[in-house]
Amino acid sequence: MTDFPSPSDRPKAAKSTAFALFRPVLVAVGVIALALGGLVLSHRSNPEIAGLDRQAPASPAALVPVVLVDPEPAPPLTAAEFKGSAFQGLELKGFQMKPPDPGAEPEPPASDRYELTLRLERGDTVEKMLADIDVPEADRKQIAEKLQKLLKKKKLATGETIELLMQTMPEQPDAPRVLSLSVRPQPEREYIVSRKDDGSYEAEEKTYKVSPRIVRVEGERDGSLQQSGIKAGAPSAAMVEFIRAMSYDVDFQRELKQGQKFTVLLEQLVTSDGLVTHPGRLLAGELRLLKRTVTVIRFRPQGGADGFYNPQGESVVRSFLRTPMDASKLTSRFGMREHPILGFSALHAGVDFSAASGTPILAAGTGKVAMAGFNGGYGLYVKLQHTQDVATAYAHMSRLGPGIKPGVSVRQGQVIGFVGSTGMSTGPHLHYEFHRGGRPVNPLAQKFAMRATVGGKDLARFQALTRQYLNQMKNAPAATDMNKPAPQKTSQAPKEPATPQVARGD
């Protein structure tokens, strides 16, 4: 016997199967029909629309616009009405929304990388700093040990910055992972500790090649010449050298005015990844005065020391500076005058230069300190003996220069003190005296000759260097453009920069 239906039963089975297949379609058609019937009934129940159906327009001219009024919304279907309606027993499963499972866990966050910079404070260690940011103990001990092996016996200075690449892990969001740590105590040396795939750490030391490059700084005098240069981007030490070289030939009191332009040429030292290790040594400078331009060139003769010369090869160094400071305003001349405090006429034995408190005062010439300390109405006072016949004096200082005391030898242009208003003074200024044979004479009336000139085998080399520096003071890259912050570090090795400009023949 088989389980197949008999031939007489097959038509019934086929009919049952067909009905089962088309039953959902019939239900859907019934639902649509009911909906259309409801629309027709609501249309007929509106008296204005029903009236329009019965009335025929007399003529096209008699047509008037009809305003359709929205019917009031039907009241919601109650449970009792629903039980007695044709929708009872229908399963509208396709329109149901599955409620969220209250027991399901949220999707874990993805791991995230970020950079962090820490500063080593007094009493800090690398391990303590990592503990403060919740790095796991095992990791921070490994990192500190690897870094110490690189540093050997050296210690990181207070204020040193430490760069970190961090990662948060989904399974331990409160225990970040250190992917790398780097510290650079010297510009040419960087120490890096990196995490390997197996969770251990390795350390390496990177060294960077240091090369010279030549840049220029252009500025305009606004206040003191030194501060104007610093604002324009020149280092303070280079501007002090520039002022000292100019002071032999420029009368800062009479010739230096606000708004005058200057250019300095600097030789910087830069690492292969663009970090400046030395802000710039002065190679040449140019000061544009009202009636002339003064230029100085650094040059070292064979067997000699660095010095500054004008483009004609004459040394700028005179026996004495014209003005012992960066000052432009002469407030009192040499001679008889009424004393501003005592109120009677007396010899003003020097000249007064108005300047901001703290402005450096330079030794007018090479000599020995004869006196350094308080001297009555002169206030804090320094006297230099240059020769048996010639001496200079500087009064009303706020403080002495480093190492200035009686018996000490000083070089021409060395800082011997700073402008102040000590003693009988009405405000910050320098009182400067020049003595010949023990008697004060007018400092502005003294004439001094050049000391030396470039000659012999040095002359051709000096002339070539002068042409190079004069051209570079116009065309060298500006220091402000070259010293912009370097791009963010990447995992790639730093690229070697283009070959820098190098001063030749010096």
Image: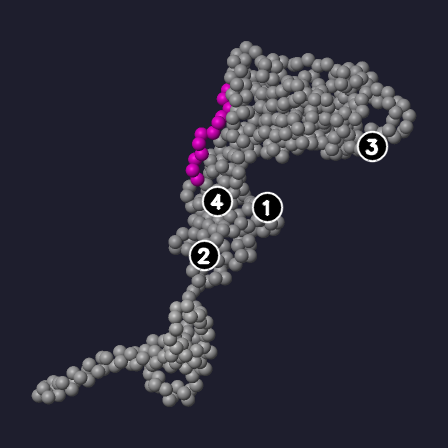
In the image, the segment drawn in magenta is: 494-506
Q: On the image, numbered disc 2 is attached to which residue?
A: 112
* Rendered view: 178 above or below 316: below
Q: Residue pushed farthest right?
A: 344
Q: Earlier in the sequence, mark 4 or mark 1?
A: 1
Could you say where residue 67 lies in the image, as x and y percent from the top left? 46, 71
Determine crowd level at label 3: few under 14, some 14-19, many 20+ residues with C-alpha closer than 10 A. few
Residue visible at 52% across and 18% down?
467
Question: What colouring style does the render use?
Answer: one colour
Q: Between residues 152 and 194, which one lies in front from this camera angle? A: 194
Does the stretch in magenta take in 323? no
The spot of residue 379 in percent (x, y) is 82, 31
Label 2, secondary structure: give it: strand
> Could you tell me the amino acid type at mark 2?
Asp
Q: CA distance from mark 3 to mark 4?
A: 54 Å
Nearer the observer: mark 3 or 1; the answer is 3
x 49%, y 51%: residue? 115
Residue 488 shows which numbered tag?
4
Residue located beneath label 3 in the image:
426
Camera-nearest label, 4 or 1: 4
